[in-house]
Image (spheres, rainbow, N blue to C red):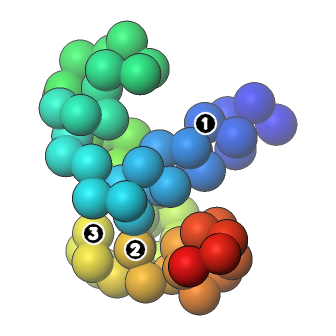
Amino acid sequence: MQEVDRERQVLRLAALGHSNSELAVPFTIAESTAKTHVKRILAKIGARDRAQGVAIAYQGGLMPGR
């Protein structure tokens, strides 16, 4: 369950426009690790790229109030 929460946090920050280096800071991970997380999350949700991942995050209600 904790893994799913982390993935949602990463996707939410990515949807807000954070770069991989910016994603790495709050999770205290390397930029390359953040990039890997994003890549795996996009694969899980069936997004072909980051832009489609953002759209899916908004459509799926991950970004409330927007």
- Which structural element holds mark 1? helix
Q: Mark 3: which amino acid?
A: Arg
The first of marks 1 and 2 along the sequence is 1
- Which structural element holds mark 3? helix
User: Pointer 3: what residue?
Assistant: 50
User: Pointer 2: what residue?
Assistant: 54
User: Image quadrant for the C terminus?
Assistant: bottom right
Q: Nearer the viewer, mark 3 or mark 2?
A: 2
User: Pointer 1: what residue?
Assistant: 6
Query: Contact (CB < 8 A) between labels 3 and 2?
Result: yes
Residue drawn at x 27%, y 59% is 17
Q: Where is residue 14 in the image (x, y as percent from the top left)?
A: 36, 55
Residue drawn at x 61%, y 36% is 6
Question: Left or right: where does residue 15 sit relative to residue 66?
Answer: left
User: Image quadrant for the N terminus?
Assistant: top right
Residue drawn at x 31%, y 20% is 25
Count of marks, rendered view: 3
Q: Where is residue 65 in the image (x, y as percent from the top left)?
A: 65, 75
- Which structural element holds mark 2? helix
Q: Mark 1: which amino acid?
A: Arg
Q: Where is residue 63 in the image (x, y as percent from the top left)?
A: 59, 69
